[in-house]
Amino acid sequence: MKILAVLLGLCLVFVFVWERVDMVRVGYQIERLKHDKTVLERQRDELRVQFSTLSASGRIARVATKELGMNPPQQGQIILVQFRPGSTAPVSVATAAPVEVRVAKNDLLARRY
Amino acid sequence: MAGIAPSGRQSVLLLLLLCGFGVVLFRLVALQIWQAAELSVKADRQHRKTVSLEGGRGTIVDRHGKVLAMNVEVPSAFGVPTTLGSPTKTARMLAPVLHVRSEELERKLRQERSFVWLARKLDPEQGRRLERLSLDGVGVVMEGRRFYPKGPFLSHVLGFAGMDGEGLEGIEHRYESYLRGEKRMMVLQRDALGRSVFPADLTERNPTPGHNLSLTIDEVIQYITERELEDAVSRAQAKSGTMIVLDPQTGAVLAMAVSPRFDPNVVSNLSPDRWRNKALTDAYEPGSTLKAVMAAAAIEERVVRPNTMVFGEHGRMAIANTVIHDHEKLGWVSFAQVIQKSSNIGAAKTGMVLGEHRLHRYLRAFGFGQKTEIDLPGEGTGLLKSVKDWGRRSVASISIGQEIGVTPLQMVSAIAALANEGVLMRPYVVSEIRSSEGQLLKRVSPQVKRRVVSPDTAHTVTKMLEGVVTDGTGVKAAIPGFRVAGKTGTAQKVDPRTGSYSASRFVTSFAGYVPAENPRLAMIVVIDEPQGDTWGGTVAAPVFSRVGEQVLSYLGVGSHEPVTLAMAL
């Protein structure tokens, strides 16, 4: 009976010690994961800044004009074509109702299109 | 003796053991009972680490979620002078990495202090190079740094945050309480090597980051506005320029540009004059653009109608010992032509018939002499004297936009009221505030300030303002395929040396809206001190036209003129 009690006591001590050790181990693990999370968040933020910088309208316009040889549309060159909602067929401009196609006046562009 | 000797040795041994145990027991009692409180405090100090943590500053995005300002953790370098070997050698190694002169670093490292900042908010690459150096007495900590990824873009509206992350100007300052992250002290357990194990209280949560702001600003519209304004200011060799684009039906600010711009990432060397948002702080004499407001007041009060005939005095009229001139010698003209040709004499006469009290009442109703209550800091009230302080010429002067100071924001708000069928809206730049988890905390709804004129009056004035663009002083504001309503303004600036109007310094402007039949944009362009050609109709109106055309196209607003294409699409 005494031996059983001693063994039980030892078991309790073992469980207590094991629990403490495991808590410390999990604690280190949490800290490591938190650190990894911080590093990943930092990388994400850096990438967001980079994306925002690269996608700025000013930069895109600069690349388009200086590197790709494009030009911004001049006044009257922007043509907006509107389709009637629900209509699936492409609008034949020559026969379209006035409300369907609205275009800024520009003969040159009209010929190009 | 043989029987006594072992017993004596045993007694001595026993005595020694007893003494030993006594000492241990005494020490235990001393540690556990007498010194318990003091030692437990010391132990806590060694095992627990209290750190101050601050949640990151909130992000600012445009109406489509494009990032305009955000926080990124970056390295800062510090030194511990007391643990340094050779400050001279360390400073020499650090200088090329930190881009700081080695003499300055050495001076810092020789200070009798336990902690000194060497360089803060460095680039991530600088931090990595610093860590590779692995110098004794030099360390790196991470700090939140405010980044404005688009550089000078929208700088006067965004403002900027200081080194310690506090908002100092613009939206950063106005919405400081929302943007700033929560500051919290946390207690961490640490092991014998000083490494953090886990928070002492496992229920403790990390500090909450600041809230995120969504603006009414549209990145593309802002870009178009800034580009065209900068171009106009440069071509006119002007001192500065301002342009605002509003949605007249809601008061939402779609773009607000001030030229020259500044880079909020690098503000340390700039004077406050560079970052002041002149669109809402600086008052100027609006000149003829104010005639639109005067006309609305006169028509609402039935003082005139568009076809009422006014005599133009052939370009010269004496009032209160002064003379008012017109740039065109006019005889009898309709009131609509007075506005179309921007006749000072016709406007002054109408203003005088309207009378000082009614004119003052309408100017106040349109928002002059008071803040528009936009959610940006530093807004000015402009200058509108009370009637009792008006002189004999004041009614005539104010009717043509002199003796009154307005901010560009006040002027565009007033013009937007005409576009909005006579209803004045409160302009605003922040549309939504969300928590860092995305939860909606506040949505800003358009706010009606008051009705200033009837819809009929607004429509009548719109027709007159269309005449300004089709046949009057503002023909260069025309946008192909769209009906534009607006008014030009060319005002002489007061020369501070003489106290009278300068003959060479002007503020030219154009304020209007488009499409006139269903306005989607209300805009103002103000160019300060253009050189050479100084007329609002030739300097400011073309900017209105270029921005308007591109923005309407971007918004998908169709023109009113159908044009038949030569071939099917």
Image (cartoon, coloured by chain):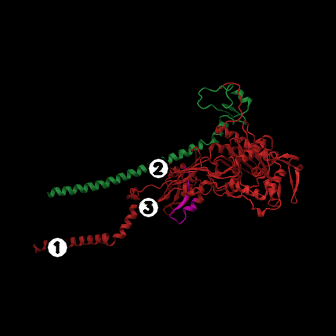
Chain colours: A green, B red
User: Residue B244: x and y, percent?
Assistant: 68, 48
Q: Could you tell me the amino acid type at mark 3?
A: Thr
- Mark 2–mark 1 Cα distance, whole angstroms, equals 66 Å
> Which residue is tagged 1?
B11
Q: Which residues are magenta?
A: B105-123
Viewer-side residue, B228 vs A111: A111
Q: Is residue B263 visible?
A: no
Q: Which residue is mark 3?
A: B50
Badge number at residue B206: none
Question: Quadrant where the C terminus of chain A lies?
Answer: top right
Question: In the rendered view of the protein, which quadrant contains the N terminus of chain A?
Answer: bottom left
Q: Along the horizontal axis of the image, is B149 left or right of B320?
A: left
Name which residue lies at 61% across and 57% down: B168
Residue B369 visible here: yes
Classify mark 3: helix, strand or loop.
strand
Mark number for residue A38?
2
Q: Position of residue B527 (x, y in %)?
A: 75, 49
